[in-house]
Amino acid sequence: MNGLVQHTAGIEIKVLAPTLKILLKDNLGIMNDILKKGGCDNVGHFDCQMCIEISTDNATDLLIDFLSDVLSLTYMQKTLFCNVYFSEFSENSISAQLYGKWLGSFDERIRGVSYLATSVRRNEEKIWESHVVFDM
């Protein structure tokens, strides 16, 4: 079950996924939907391509840094990055190409990803689970 949860600091999302790679992609999709509802629906072409590389100590920091880097690029480029291709991927390091479409405006403004309230873990069923809090 993926979705939004009320949080006092902003918006919290919870995502469950069979792999860490899918977990990152699903978190990106939900973040995009917060920024612009339906903004990535029916994308026929991409206007922008950017590359990111991230190395961290653990999966939680990997998710936080990934979403933070994409969020920064989103605001700098005025682009929703609807697709991601991971050329390298591990639990603490990624190289990725982001593909996005330019936007005129956003529905919501996310100030950042909370380091204190965000977590990634494998639950009892060995499913990847994340709780991300976006500061609004």
Image: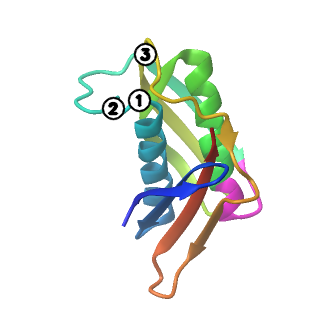
The reply to whether the C-beta atoms of the residues labelled 1 and 2 are less than 8 Å apart is: yes
Give the amino acid at mark 2. Cys
Residue 122 in the image: state x and y as whole percent: 55, 77
The image shows residue 123 at horizontal and vertical percentages of 52, 81
- Residue beneath label 3, please? 102
- Name the N-terminal-most of marks 3 and 1: 1
Marks 1 and 2, Cα distance to the nearest angstrom?
Answer: 8 Å
Is residue 88 found left or right of 2 in the rendered image? Answer: right
Residue drawn at point x = 48 percent, y = 21 percent: 79
| Outermost front residue | 8
Q: Nearer the N terminus, badge 2 or badge 3?
A: 2
Question: Which residue is at the front of the view, 63 or 90?
Answer: 63
- Badge 2 crowding class, 10 Å Cα cut-off, few under 14, some 14 to 19, many 20 or more, is some
Residue 131 vs 94, above or below: the answer is below
Q: Residue at x 49, y 42 (%)?
A: 31
Helix, strand or loop at mark 3: strand
Q: Give the side of residue 8 with respect to residue 83, left or right.
A: right
Mark linked to residue 40? 2
User: Quick one: 78 or 99, which is closer to the camera?
Assistant: 78
Q: Secondary structure at mark 1?
A: loop
**Residue extending furthest toward the top:** 104
Magenta-colored span: 55-62
Percent x, y of residue 29: 41, 44
Query: Which of the labelled discs sits on residue 36, or is there none?
Result: 1
